Structure formats: C-alpha cells, structure tokens
Image (cartoon, grey):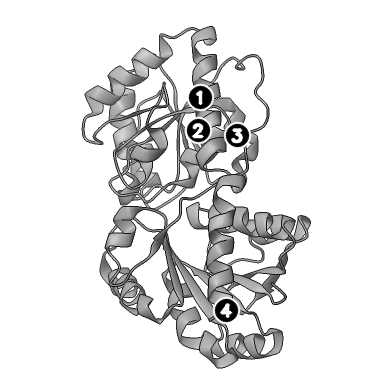
Amino acid sequence: MDKAIWLMLDSRNVGGIESHVGQLAKALHKRGYDVWVVFWKLYDSEHPLRSELQQRGVKTLLLGGSPWRFIRAVRRCKPRIVHTHGYKAGLVGRFLSWCGGASVVSSYHAGETPTGRVWLYDWLDRQSAYLCQARIAVSEQIASRLPCSAMVIDNFVQAAEPATNEIAGDQQIAFVGRLSVEKAPERILKIAEQLPQQTFHLYGDGPLLSDLQSKAPDNVVFHGKVDDMSQCWPAIELLLIPSRAEGLPMVALEAMAHGASVIASPLGGLPSLLKDVDGCCLIDGDNTYGWAAAIDDYQQLSESQKQPLAEQAKAKVERAYSTTAILPLFESIYAKVSRT
C-alpha cells in the first residue's frame, strides 16, 4: 500500500483505546506501512502515547481540534485510509475525510452505554457508522449495537516474552483501569474487606478516586495514574476486572501476556479470552463472596502450581491475541477498502 494510513483518536490520557492504537501503530510500522497516529487535540503539553510512538519511529500529527486543519492535512498528505477510534474521532473523521478522498474505517471499542451528553455523541457515532467503508468492533456485543454490519476483530498485544522458570515473589492482586462507574472499582473494596490478610493494589485515576480512598480498608493501596504500566505488569500475578460493561479490555491481554491470571465479570470478549485457561475465571460482578473465594483459592496455590497457569495465560494470548494472529485481519480490511 503506497499511501498513508492514519490512526485517528481524541485522547486525554492513556487507556484501552490508546493502548490498542499504540499496538496497532507499532505493528503496522514494523510491517513497513506508512502509518501516522493523528491526535484531534492535545489536552496537556504532551501525551504519553505520542512520546512513546515518536521514540519508536512512528509518525504523529496534531490537529489542534480544528476541522479546517484536518481538511487541509487530508488534502496535503492524501492518506488512503483514515482509521478512527472513539466517538469524537469517528464523527469528525467520517464527516470530513471525504474532502480529501480518503476511505474511512471506524473501530468501536466501548462496551458501556454512556449517560448525559456523551450518550448523544455515542448514539450519533453508532448511527453514522454506515458512512464508513468498513467497521470494526472488538466484541460481538459491541457489533450488535451498530445499525449496520461490522467485522469483529479482537484487541491484541505483542506476543509474550519467552517464559521464565519461576514467578517472582511478593506478587500483587490488582485492579488496573479508570476509576469510574462502568469499571466498578468499589467492588474491589468489598472484596478487600472479606480478605483482610491480602493486599489489593489499584492502578488508575478517575472520578471515583476520592470516594474510594475515603471508604477503602487498610489493605487497599492506591497507585494513581500510571502512564506506562510496562514496569508494573511483572509485579502483578492476579488481575481483577469486576466491570459493569466491557468490550475486550487491553489490560486483560497485557496482564496475561506477562503471565498473570485474570478473574473477570462475564462481559464482552472476556469469556472467549479466559475460556480453557486454568487459573482464570468468570464471576458475576455483584458476587463479591464468589470473588473472595476464588482469590483465596488462587492464593493457596504454591509457586510451582502457579507457574503452569502463567504459561497457559501467555500461550493463549500468543496463539489468539497477538500481532501475528490479529494484524492480518486489519491488513485484509485495509486492502479491501483501498480498492474501493
């Protein structure tokens, strides 16, 4: 493909969409594509994803929140494909890309149903999906909410590193994500109250932070916003995802790629991800007693018993959720769209 691919997003910080875009951009760049990550607007002096991509040699573009700058950039750079991620990037990309003749691919990531003004944006994003040349959803559940057909492509991460012979000591039980209603972090506090002998680690920031801190028992540790989790994953052996809504969370893939087991609510693409992986399980988010029992069972295992579980988690991601497994699906869509 001789013309550029733009991966476009509107981002304030690093979350699941940003992790996905980063993985996709780096994989396409490594495969030799002329890929650009396009930020609708910078909300701070710099964005962690932009800095990381530039260090990897991936080109980035800032639009400053200006439709006219977007149109001028499309006409000047003439990207063959604008691949949007998130509702604002999707709406802007679909309505403006035609000015420069670019084909539009839109990915739908959000499993939750938003409220307030965001509900309207989300509804417009989904209802305008027919304006895309191709649509991608990260789970069947998300695809079913669109008014037209979409291809389901799982999130993916870099393949796991070769397995080590042992699991490091003092491993963590952790929640990683936005501290918001849809992620249900308050359920972690209820679980922690039932297991006072265990320490629970919460990585992330969000609107519920202050309330959670005021109610948390002494065995909960808040780490706050972490822009780069790469240094934290090796310390986590059990990831908890008690969400009320999910697509296919990148944190689950990243944790498993590092050998962590996952306990999660049965939502979105999580049942397929955790199927047939010993040490991982699905439990209804409101069943905090069930969560506590599962965590306690896991912690009763010896290090030698946990090691095969870590290998299974890594193998599942490498087999079905790695760059090797997933990137060809994106390439097939790009190739098809570029011919239209």
Tell me the quarter of the picture where residue 61 sits. bottom right
Q: Is residue 29 left or right of residue 192?
A: right
State which tag comes first along the sequence, 3 or 1. 3
**Image x and y of residue 225, in percent:** 53, 46
Report the mark closest to the observer, 3 or 1. 1
Q: Are marks 4 and 3 in contact (CB under 8 Å)?
A: no
Report the mark closest to the observer, 1 or 4. 4
Residue wearing tag 1: 312
* Mark 2 crowdedness (10 Å alpha carbons): few <14, some 14-19, many ≥20: many
Residue at position x 46%, y 50% from top? 154
Q: Could you tell me how far apart the alpha carbons at marks 1 and 4 are, in whole angstroms? A: 40 Å
Residue wearing tag 2: 316
Q: Are marks 1 and 2 in contact (CB under 8 Å)?
A: yes
Identify the element where label 2 is drawn. Answer: helix
Can you say whether 285 is above or below 2 in the image?
A: above
State which tag comes first along the sequence, 3 or 2. 3
Residue wearing tag 4: 339
Q: Amino acid at mark 2?
A: Lys
Can you say whether 319 is above or below 34 in the image?
A: above
* Pick the front one: 99 or 91: 99
**Image x and y of residue 20, in percent:** 54, 54
Tell me the quarter of the picture where residue 217 sits. top left
Report the mark closest to the observer, 4 or 3. 4
* Pick the front one: 307 or 318: 318
Residue at position x 50%, y 57% from top? 17
State which tag comes first along the sequence, 2 or 4. 2
Q: Is residue 182 left or right of residue 52?
A: left
Residue at position x 50%, y 33% from top? 316
Identify the element where label 1 is drawn. Answer: helix
Q: Could you tell me how far apart the alpha carbons at marks 3 and 1 are, in whole angstroms? A: 20 Å
State which tag comes first along the sequence, 1 or 4. 1
